[in-house]
Image (tube, rainbow, N blue to C red):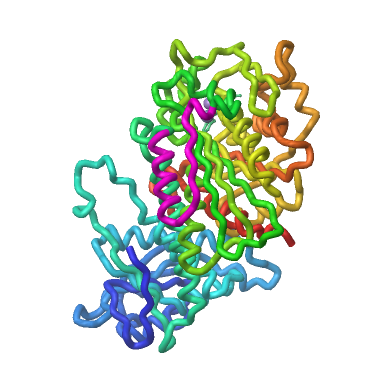
């Protein structure tokens, strides 16, 4: 699907989409659409349309006209007419979702070219505090994401399914501004990274192994002139990453360790890098502490943190093509392993020496993410001395218990960065909420035979996991940890059932060090 612009009086699409608040007349809601579709106001179906939330109407005009179909999307009451009510970021979420559902309906009708009335969109968006460009970016991204499908393993060819090929923003001007074009191109760069992350997380464990993930990383790196180094299991050992090695030692698929180094054009010389670390467990059976069978298949997505990191590099590569560069070097660190039970697998009670030197008693082999992250964080610190380290991981079921589905927990050594990420989570519709880094939970990880146990009490499981990770970096390191265990999967307006691609937008924003005031 490609996104275009059509300027005034050159409009031609299969269907034109417009937005309406409840109880508005056609003149208010679709003033501009009426120009390109003069039949709109007298279309009989309009009479019964109330503009209620989740209400939609398809209207038909004379088939010979350039625009002979329209769909009006109801948004419910315009509560912002009440002066005391100020719009929240999430109010636009409802507009975006209503749009995404409408677009999917157009696809299911078999239409190939969909127009969006930008005057109608801007009118609604501005009520909610969004500029025309911001709205166009969100709507473009939503279009790419809601039309995504993972069909690699379907026998029926993709071509047979209905397919939207073009979306055009219909402009009331005789030209399209650069700002508007840039907004749409920016969304395309984001969509590339997010769809890559989705493809990786939707891929089954027999297709996506540590090696094939590393192959994908090398592909992204060579597409965008990013440096990529891949360590094999032996090299992981010689780097003393014994905790990472331990997780993968029961698998027939050897572990890998990917290091991406992106030095943007004109990167400031006097800055230290930002490191992005992603948990890459290509399948998590739990190991000898085997998981129950019921949803075990979902653990093919236990590399969603790694996918978010690689997706971010893809987006950064696409943005570079648009001439947009972060001001620092960005390092990506992706530890990859498959957690399996086997005669060679790590056992409860086993002890390993991590890269940082601390010994870990492995109480539960299912708490494997923190093992591979402990070594990855220590590696990032030792090799790159980053000014900021961010890790993202599907780490604990407890995080889902704390925050519910479709949200991630954010832990940070700097409160203002955690708050920034929380705000950006609202802005990007990647829900994120700060949880505390509490040292008093550390005694819960005390072992009688090693320096630390890999898991503690059930209570506050997401918090003890975070405090465990913190032990593998220097005291004063500026560090952010995102637990995305409850945000990796969805089935909603912009996510066909499966992987969300969560984190790419937040990490891309982080790479531009926008958290520094
Ligand atoms: N990958 C899981 C966490 C997870 C659970 C992700 C559900 C997505 C959905 C992680 O490796 C794990 O098994 N964590 C354990 C930790 C426990 C043994 C301390 C958990 O959350 O139960
Ligand atoms: Mn696990
Ligand atoms: Zn896991």
Q: Position of residue 301 (x, y in %)?
A: 45, 36
In what quadrant of the picture does the C terminus appear? Answer: bottom right
- Residue 403 vertical placement versus 126 (above, below): above
In what quadrant of the picture does the N terminus appear? Answer: bottom left
Say if residue 115 shows up in the picture. yes
- Residue 41 vertical placement versus 182 (above, below): below
Q: Residue at x 66, y 20 (%)?
A: 360
- Residue 330 vertical placement versus 304 (above, below): below
Q: Residue at x 34, y 88 (%)?
A: 9
Q: Position of residue 180 (x, y in %)?
A: 48, 76
Tell which residue pokes out farthest to the right in this image: 440
Q: How many numbered dots are placed on residues in this image?
A: 0
Q: Is residue 485 magenta?
A: no
Q: State which quadrant residue 37 falls in.
A: bottom left
Instruction: Name the foreground residue: 139 vs 417.
Output: 417
Q: Position of residue 306 (x, y in %)?
A: 51, 41
Instruction: Name the foreground residue: 422 vs 510.
Output: 510
Left or right relative to 89: residue 61: left
**Magenta range:** 211-236
Q: Residue at x 41, y 81 (%)?
A: 171
Quarter holding ligand 1 = top right
The kind of secondary structure the magenta stretch mainly shows is helix
Instruction: Name the foreground residue: 281 vs 183.
Output: 281
Say if residue 53 shows up in the picture. no
- Residue 123 vertical placement versus 260 (above, below): below
Q: Residue at x 60, y 35 (%)?
A: 376
Q: Position of residue 170 (x, y in %)?
A: 39, 78
Left or right relative to 9: residue 369: right
Q: State which quadrant residue 400 falls in.
A: top right
Q: Is residue 229 magenta?
A: yes
């Amino acid at each position: 699907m490609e996104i275009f612009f059509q300027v005034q009086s050159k409009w031609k699409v299969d269907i034109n989409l417009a937005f309406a608040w409840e109880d508005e007349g056609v003149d208010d809601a679709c003033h501009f659409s009426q120009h390109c579709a003069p039949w709109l106001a007298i279309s009989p179906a309009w009479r019964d349309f109330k503009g209620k939330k989740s209400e939609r109407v398809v209207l038909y005009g004379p088939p010979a006209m350039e625009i002979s179909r329209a769909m009006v999307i109801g948004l419910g009451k315009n509560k912002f007419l009440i002066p005391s009510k100020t719009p929240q970021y999430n109010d636009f979420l409802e507009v975006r979702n209503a749009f995404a559902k409408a677009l999917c309906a157009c696809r299911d009708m078999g239409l190939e070219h969909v127009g969006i009335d930008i005057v109608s969109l801007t009118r609604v968006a501005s009520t909610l505090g969004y500029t025309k460009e911001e709205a166009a970016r969100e709507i473009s991204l939503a279009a790419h994401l809601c039309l995504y499908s993972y069909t690699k393993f379907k026998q029926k060819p993709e071509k047979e399914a209905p397919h939207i090929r073009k979306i055009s923003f219909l402009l009331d001007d005789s030209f399209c501004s650069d700002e508007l074009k840039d907004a749409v191109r920016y969304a395309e760069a984001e969509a590339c990274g997010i769809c890559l992350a989705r493809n990786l997380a939707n891929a089954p464990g027999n297709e996506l192994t540590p090696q094939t993930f590393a192959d994908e990383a090398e592909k992204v790196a060579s597409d965008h002139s990013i440096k990529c180094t891949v360590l094999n299991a032996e090299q992981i050992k010689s780097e003393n990453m014994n905790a990472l090695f331990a997780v993968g030692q029961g698998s027939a698929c050897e572990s890998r360790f990917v290091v991406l180094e992106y030095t943007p054009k004109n990167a400031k010389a006097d800055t230290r890098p930002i490191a992005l670390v992603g948990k890459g467990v290509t399948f998590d059976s739990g190991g000898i502490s085997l998981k129950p069978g019921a949803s075990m298949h979902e653990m093919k997505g236990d590399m969603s943190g790694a996918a978010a990191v690689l997706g971010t590099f893809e987006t950064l590569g696409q943005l570079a093509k648009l001439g947009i560069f972060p001001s620092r070097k960005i390092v990506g660190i992706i530890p990859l392993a498959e957690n399996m039970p086997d005669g060679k697998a790590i056992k409860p009670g086993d002890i390993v020496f991590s890269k940082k030197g601390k010994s870990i008693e492995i109480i539960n082999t299912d708490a494997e993410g923190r093992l591979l992250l402990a070594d990855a964080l220590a590696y990032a610190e030792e090799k790159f001395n980053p000014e900021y380290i961010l890790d993202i991981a599907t780490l604990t079921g407890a995080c889902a218990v704390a925050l519910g589905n479709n949200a991630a927990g954010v832990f940070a050594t700097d409160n203002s960065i955690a708050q920034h990420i929380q705000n950006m989570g609202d802005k990007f519709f990647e829900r994120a909420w700060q949880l505390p880094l509490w040292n008093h939970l550390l005694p819960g990880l005390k072992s009688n035979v090693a320096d630390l146990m890999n898991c503690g009490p059930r209570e506050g499981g997401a918090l003890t996991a975070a405090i465990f990770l913190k032990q593998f970096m220097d005291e004063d390191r500026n560090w952010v940890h995102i637990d995305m265990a409850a945000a990796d999967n969805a089935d909603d307006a912009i996510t066909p059932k499966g992987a969300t691609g969560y984190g790419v937008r937040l990490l891309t924003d982080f790479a531009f060090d926008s958290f520094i005031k």
